[in-house]
Amino acid sequence: MNAAADRGIGQAEAGRGWKPGHKIRLLENGEEYFPRVFEAIRAARCEVLIETFILFQDKIGNELHAAVIDAAKRGVRVELTVDGYGSPDLDKDFIAAMTDAGVTLHIFDPKPRLLGMRTNVFRRLHRKLVVIDRERVFVGGINFSHDHVADFGPAAKQDYAVEIEGPVVEDIRLFMESALSGKAAKRRRRSQRQQSIPVDSAGSVLFATRDNDRHPTDIEQHYREAIRSARREVIIANAYFFPGFRLLRELRLAARRGVRVMLILQGEPDMAMAKWAPRMLFGYLLKAGVEIHEYCERPLHGKVAVVDAKWSTVGSSNLDPLSLSFNLESNVFILDRAFSRHLHERLEVLMRKHCKQFKLEHIERSNWQAFMSFLAFHFMRHFPVFAGWVPVRAPRMETMRANAAVVAEEGASMADSGDAAENANSMMSLPVEKRRVQELQA
């Protein structure tokens, strides 16, 4: 590992924490998110770093494809990382067009299918991050796929992201650079104390990640601390809700001490389990006074929360076993009254116009339902132990880029010939170099 990479890892660790002085913009759904991201990529001058769980070759994926190719041809450094499970079907021509233009493509933990089924189910790269020119960052739950835009149809997802300018951009950039460096930093003890929520300061942001090494519970801990500190109101909108026992207990305790606790969950899910599994917990929560609202207009894909209209979070982490115990996730936590009030208002509209409130009398009280709820509750209570049985390994990263040696050779020969047109045409036909490196889970 070179010295720059070493410094990046060290700074990424040391620089984490609440930082003031940010401009924060909520982006609701693909209609607001994609135009801002594509505009930023097209205006990039030096660097574009992207991580996404899903990249599909559809209307949105093709627009990203064109934007990063154009940026690379302008001389912008473009690093695009996708997950091998979430983005399994990118064809060779789609990839070659990017790498030939100078885009470096990283595929996290690619694996062949077994009997037509994807096998890399656990430890997925689920983060959604975009950093432009060290000046702005986009964080949220929105993938690069058409199903995040309303014209996709009834299955279009309801989701959220944020655009941020300020000091946290460099924290996120250094984190992404460390993930690309290919070698893990030395393991540290996990006794690092979580930073408490600071005294209210406009524009304060903290970047937190979840991994299978040094930060396995950071995101969940920030949720629990915020719920514990709530005085008036907690709103959580989460697509896949099946959290651990400790987080459930904090929700119940908050409701019992008079905090209004509202959950917005899927009522028209993209997967049946997203509706069926949480319902096994409803009795436990409703009896304590927690309100449950099911969003029924289309699938909910958001991962956001607001506490007391001043603290909020937006990111990739669901509150389910995959996100809390296996996947690589990232959230920003925001202490800003103006932003939090705006997100609060948007969630209030969602509940008022597009949700149905689920009440205790709606629970089916059959013996089977009671038995399944009992099993679900105790499964969650002991899930951290079960998760520990799944082996933690270092997934590989497959990196594809234009062959540097060939680039140098072709560039030198073409410089001698002085034929600019031939230079441009030949550079587009350079072969792709593949190398496998180890993912830094930091």
Image (cartoon, rainbow, N blue to C red):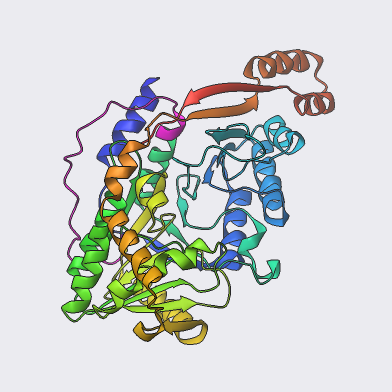
Q: How many marks?
A: 0
Q: Residue visible at 33% across and 43% down? A: 387
Q: Is residue 118 left or right of residue 410?
A: left
Residue that protrudes farthest toward the front in the picture: 367
Residue 4 part of the magenta-drawn span: no
Q: Which residues are magenta?
A: 178-204
Q: Residue at x 69, y 40 (%)?
A: 90
Residue 343 screen position, x and y as percent:
41, 73
Q: Residue at x 59, y 64 (%)?
A: 30
Nearer to me, 202 or 157: 157
Q: Most prominent secondary structure in the magenta stretch? A: loop
Residue 269 image position (x, y, % from top left): 54, 67
- Image quadrant where residue 220 sits: bottom left
Q: Position of residue 340 (x, y in %)?
A: 35, 72
Q: Is residue 202 magenta?
A: yes
Which residue occupies the foreground of this view, 86 or 316? 86
Classify residue 360 by image quadrant. bottom left
Q: Is residue 357 above or below residue 432?
A: below
Q: Is residue 331 left or right of residue 92?
A: left
